[in-house]
């Protein structure tokens, strides 16, 4: 299967089955902004829930927060985003298209007569590169004046730094400890694309771990290991995950060291999460810009210091795309192609489909009762239309791990057929035990 074909097929399946829709589609869509449909919202929610469980609930040393998207404008001066969160751009004076200056499709040097526009092909019409800030601006209050400009946050991390003292003082944490957050971020990306990989509105799952100076390198290594394991535990193909270490020219202004976890997408190896040793840059800058002391007093050692920060920063949308890409497969079954999303059962949006074999002999009633019973424990789906094979195929495309059929034997023996998505093996299970049977296998207790 050609790689571009795989992405096209995935985008089309996502729309057809209700995973992802283009934003404002009836108006022609909004560039690189996407909406999650009924199945997509469940899939992404499962990603976020697993992250929250691993980072907050399963640990004693991390607290969660939910900071506002709008923050004081000085935050973005302190963080370096006002001055430095920029891409160099060039415009074509002829066709009015805009490109990143390092767009590999541009021939020649922008600003020079030899440079050629990659869209209209005109020569000498590309401007010199100009820096363009990626933050979205809006206005606070009724008057659209400069004093009222605020930004939509381009990362969630700053909401954690400015609340560091609040969390420290209101919880029983002592250094080393972390603060985790899941939330929306916005970037006016110039070359967005590849479906939900790079979008202008997206969700981050970020954690900032505050450590004593001198211990940062060792915490950085621990966090690298834990985060890679988290991705492997989602059931992703291990060979499609790798590390990419940032070279000196790639490091962000705040970072002492940085590694990306990359996934092999059909469009190449790309970052899904960054692990950064941010040193004392962030607290140092917020201390300087706010005038508020952010030092930590270590009572046991009787010393005062500015903590260093190890950050783990993953994109919820990118991880969701990774799951979709990794799960998609086509198989020949009895002369027909079956499309399967082979999700790890724990992240599958629907855990079980329930089907009466025929619409008579009391089967729909039994199946409906069973469906309502299952739905109390996990997401289930009822389907009584079409041949049973077609109903199985529909659930395969949605990535549903189990199909439960109520048939002639159900009334007599109180058993149902349970079909497993990947092996397509069928097993008879007692009606009274089928909820537990599925719950155990999808990790719902
Ligand atoms: N606080 C550090 C930070 O924001 P980043 O490498 O710019 O670092 C972290 O972003 C993660 O956020 C990325 O690994 C990616 O998963 C996600 N992300 C960043 N920009 C994105 C975009 N335009 N669309 C979707 N996800 C994005």
Image (spheres, rainbow, N blue to C red):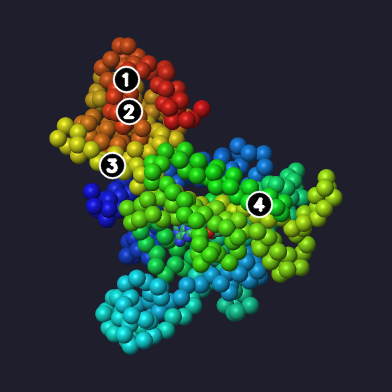
Mark 2 against mark 3, which lies toward the viewer? 3
Asked if labels 4 and 2 touch by Cβ distance under 8 angstroms, the answer is no
Q: Residue at x 82, y 53 (%)?
A: 303
| Residue at the disc numbered 3 | 329
Q: Position of residue 368 (x, y in %)?
A: 36, 27
User: Dot 1: few (<14), some (14–19), or many (≥20) neighbours within 10 Å?
Assistant: few
Q: Position of residue 276 (x, y in %)?
A: 57, 56
Asked if labels 2 and 1 touch by Cβ distance under 8 angstroms, the answer is yes
Q: CA distance from mark 1 to mark 3?
A: 24 Å
| Residue at the disc numbered 1 | 427
Which element type, helix, strand or loop, lies under badge 1? Answer: strand
| Residue at the disc numbered 4 | 216
Indicate whether 353 appears above or below 426.
below
Q: CA distance from mark 1 to mark 2?
A: 8 Å
User: Dot 4: few (<14), some (14–19), or many (≥20) neighbours within 10 Å?
Assistant: many
Q: Please give the label number shown on residue 343.
A: none
Mark 4 against mark 3, which lies toward the viewer? 4
User: Dot 2: few (<14), some (14–19), or many (≥20) neighbours within 10 Å?
Assistant: some
Q: Residue at x 29, y 85 (%)?
A: 123
Q: Position of residue 163 (x, y in %)?
A: 69, 56
Q: Quadrant of residue 357?
A: top left
Which element type, helix, strand or loop, lies under badge 3? Answer: strand
Q: Could you tell whether 233 is left or right of 11 in the image? A: right
């Amino acid at each position: 299967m050609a790689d571009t074909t795989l992405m096209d097929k995935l985008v089309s399946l996502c729309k057809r089955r209700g995973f992802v829709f283009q934003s404002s589609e009836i108006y022609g869509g909004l560039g690189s902004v996407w909406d999650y449909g009924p199945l997509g919202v469940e899939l992404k929610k499962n990603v976020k829930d697993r992250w929250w469980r691993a980072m907050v609930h399963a640990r004693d040393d991390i607290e969660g927060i939910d900071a506002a998207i709008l923050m004081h404008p000085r935050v973005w001066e302190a963080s370096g985003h006002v001055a430095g969160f920029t891409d160099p751009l060039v415009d074509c004076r002829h066709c009015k298209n805009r490109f990143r200056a390092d767009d590999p499709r541009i021939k020649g040097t922008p600003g020079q007569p030899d440079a050629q526009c990659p869209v209209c092909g005109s020569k000498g019409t590309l401007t010199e590169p100009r820096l363009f800030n990626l933050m979205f601006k809006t206005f606070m209050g009724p008057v659209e004046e400069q004093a009222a400009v605020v930004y939509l946050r381009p990362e969630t991390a700053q909401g954690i730094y400015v609340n560091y003292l609040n969390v420290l003082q209101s919880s029983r944490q002592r250094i080393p400890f972390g603060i985790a957050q899941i939330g929306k971020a916005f970037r006016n990306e110039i070359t967005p694309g590849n479906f939900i990989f790079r979008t202008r509105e997206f969700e981050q799952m970020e954690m900032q771990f505050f450590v004593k100076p001198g211990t940062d390198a060792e915490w950085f290594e621990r966090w690298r290991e834990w985060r890679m394991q988290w991705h492997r535990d989602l059931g992703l193909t291990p060979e499609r995950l790798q590390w990419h270490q940032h070279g000196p020219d790639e490091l962000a202004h705040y970072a002492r060291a940085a590694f990306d976890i990359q996934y092999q997408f059909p469009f190449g190896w790309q970052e899904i999460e960054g692990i950064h040793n941010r040193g004392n840059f962030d607290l140092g800058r917020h201390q300087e810009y706010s005038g508020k002391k952010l030092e930590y007093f270590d009572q046991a050692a009787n010393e005062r210091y500015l903590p260093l920060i190890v950050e783990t920063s993953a994109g919820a949308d990118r991880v969701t795309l990774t799951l979709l890409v990794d799960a998609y497969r086509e198989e020949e079954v009895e002369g027909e192609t079956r499309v399967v999303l082979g999700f790890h059962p724990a992240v599958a949006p629907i855990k079980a489909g329930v089907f009466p074999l025929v619409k008579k002999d009391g089967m729909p009633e039994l199946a409906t009762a069973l469906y309502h019973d299952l739905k109390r424990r996990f997401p289930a789906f009822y389907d009584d239309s079409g041949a049973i094979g077609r109903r199985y195929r529909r659930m395969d495309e949605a990535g549903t791990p189990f199909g439960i059929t109520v048939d002639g034997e159900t009334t007599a023996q109180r058993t149902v057929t349970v079909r497993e998505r990947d092996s397509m093996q069928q097993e008879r299970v007692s009606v009274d035990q089928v909820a537990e049977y599925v719950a155990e296998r999808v990790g719902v207790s």
